[in-house]
Amino acid sequence: MSIIQQQHVIVTGASSGVGLYATEALIQQGWHVVMACRDLQKTMRVASQLQLNPTQFSIMKLDLGSLQSVREFVKDFESKGFPLHALLNNAASYQPRLKTPARSPEGFELSVATNHLGHFLLSRLLMPLLIQTQTSEQESNPNFQSRLVTLGTVTANSEEFGGKVPIPAPADLGDLAGLEHGFLDPIAMIDGKTFKAGKAYKDSKLCNMIISREMHRRYHDSTGIIFSTVYPGCVADTALFRDTPKAFQTIFPWFQKNITKGYVTQTLAGQRVTQVVVDKDFSSSGVHWSWGNRQVPGRQAFAQPLSAKATQLTMGIRLWELSNKLVGMAD
Ligand code: NAP
């Protein structure tokens, strides 16, 4: 089968953790994975360490923290003539020890710029290709639906215990005052309040879950594309936690394995996320899929209710409008 005939998925942040193991599992399912990563050499190295089949993946440069890089990635991708059956928005940056905000090239606080605004722009720019691929696939397979899957998390869902933890504060976008006022220095938080690095990450993940629902509301009925978010379990030993204190990096996985029983391996997390991208059991749109925080053998996924903060219609609409403005998209 030629590359063009394979099912194609873009995986952001495929150089590590969940994204890397999802790449492996997607390849095992016969898909062609475009590993969209900021560090090409690292990505080549890890792909070779896992002995990924070179005919089933491509590596392309994407720095989600830079809106220009997102636009260049989409242009490069389009120029290859690949179809796009699915987009997996997986990458994230978590820097909980920063005392002052890091900034994107456009001047936005970096974790929200990377995790939310970069993925927002990427998703918006790739929608036409998801629709086009779905239309041409449906000529031979009328039931085919493209998918846009985004990694969510418990720490941004106040319906769950993990979402109530006040260290440094639960996710809360307030009235979006920080975005309303342009999100540039000295503004560093979406709610316009004092910078708290750990909360900026949680806020960005809450944005991921809100925007997935808003995309479902705007596009699902008219296009048939499936939009969902997923929490595969606590993958407590990924590089996501690289900037936490060393003691935390030892204690946290132990705690998740032995006390909460929330721990899942990177391999299992990658396989679970892959199920959401490919399996017919996950073909409902507008759903947050979770494997919960008590892992037992044979644990099945379920549709997890999200908090009011993630489901309020007015919040979804306003976050969409303000994000459009910041990334330079028309409605
Ligand atoms: P990880 O191992 O640190 O992987 C994160 C990936 O994102 C890496 O490939 C990283 O690239 C990439 N990335 C970071 N900043 C980027 C940028 N500016 N541009 C492009 N790529 C960038 O973390 P993980 O645990 O697998 O996290 C994957 C997803 O799962 C995240 O969305 C996270 O929020 C979510 N999640 C994780 C857990 C967990 O327990 N680990 C729980 C809930 C949700 P580099 O390799 O170059 O650093």
Image (cartoon, grey):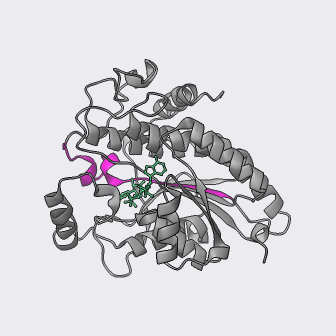
Question: Looking at this view, is 45 or 26 the one in front?
Answer: 45
Most extreme residue toward the top, as rendered?
181
The x, y position of residue 210, in whole percent, is 47, 41
The quadrant in which residue 3 appears is bottom right
Tell me if I can see residue 79 in this picture. Answer: yes
Residue under the point 17% across and 53% down:
245
Question: Looking at this view, is 228 or 121 the one in front?
Answer: 121
The quadrant in which residue 145 appears is bottom right
The quadrant in which residue 217 appears is top right
Residue 82 is inside the magenta segment: no
**Quarter of the image containing the N terminus?**
bottom right
Residue under the point 41% across and 69% down:
269
- Above or below residue 189? Residue 307 is below
- Above or below residue 38? Residue 289 is below
Tell me if I can see residue 213 in this picture. Answer: no
Most extreme residue toward the front, as rendered?
41
- Above or below residue 43? Residue 220 is above
Q: In the visual, does 72 lie left or right of 80? A: left
The x, y position of residue 322, in whole percent, is 52, 26
Q: In the visual, does 155 lie left or right of 319? A: left
The x, y position of residue 7, in whole percent, is 70, 68
Residue under the point 28% across and 24% down:
193
Magenta span of residues: 146-167
